[in-house]
Amino acid sequence: MPKEDALVRVAQNKKAWHDYFILEEYEAGIALFGTEVKSIRQGRVNLKDSWCGIKNGEMFVSGMHISPYEQGNIYNRDPTRVRKLLMHKHEILRLFGESQQQGLAVIPLSLYFKSGRAKLQIGLCKGKKLYDKRDAAAAKDAKREAERNWREENR
């Protein structure tokens, strides 16, 4: 019987959803060392200030912090080292073209395990202005208030 593609979400970049409009989402593998994978499985990863860049036709993620594995000893790597993302060349070139022409950013959205392999969900993002953030907060508050009123009426 084949193994199910169960997604085990480890970390999410909530700041990205607050600061950016997510236009497109992509899934990328990530090149890690063994102690980094063990640390990620313990949930010791932070995507808050991370971003993706393209150099020489390859995509890398910078600013992602993976805490050192406690039993790793000499095998631990630098927690904030630049890590290579594994994507198809045509996807990388498409992201590079769109980010250069339209001034968009490529931001990691979440980190999860899929069939035992670490995957990074990245998004092609456009930055929000302050008034966009205020509009989103107002819409969220209005939705919460409407749900609260609906619950009270249906008691």
Image (cartoon, rainbow, N blue to C red):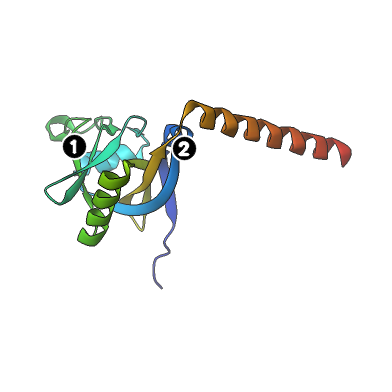
**Callout 1: 10 Å neighbours few (<14), some, many (20+)?**
some
Residue where numbered disc 2 is placed: 17
Residue at point 41%, 61% (across, down): 5
Which residue appears farthest toward the bottom when viewing the image? Answer: 1
Residue 112, image x, y percentages: 38, 47
| Image quadrant occupied by the N terminus | bottom left
Label 2 Cα neighbours within 10 Å, binned few <14 / some 14-19 / many ≥20: some
For numbered disc 2, what is the local secondary structure? helix
Determine the CA span between mark 2 and mark 1.
23 Å
Secondary structure of the residue carrying tag 1 is loop
Residue type at tag 2: Trp
| Residue that numbered label 1 is attached to | 82
Q: Residue at x 22, y 30 (%)?
A: 79
In which quadrant is the C terminus drawn? top right
- x and y percentages locating residue 93 in the rendered image: 22, 55
Residue shown at 75% from the left, 38% from the top: 147
Q: Nearer the N terminus, badge 2 or badge 1?
A: 2
Is residue 95 visible to us here? yes
> Does residue 117 appear in the picture of this structure?
no
In the displayed structure, 46 sits above or below 31; it is above
Q: Quadrant of residue 39?
A: top left
The amino acid pointed to by label 1 is Val
Q: Quadrant of residue 117?
A: bottom left
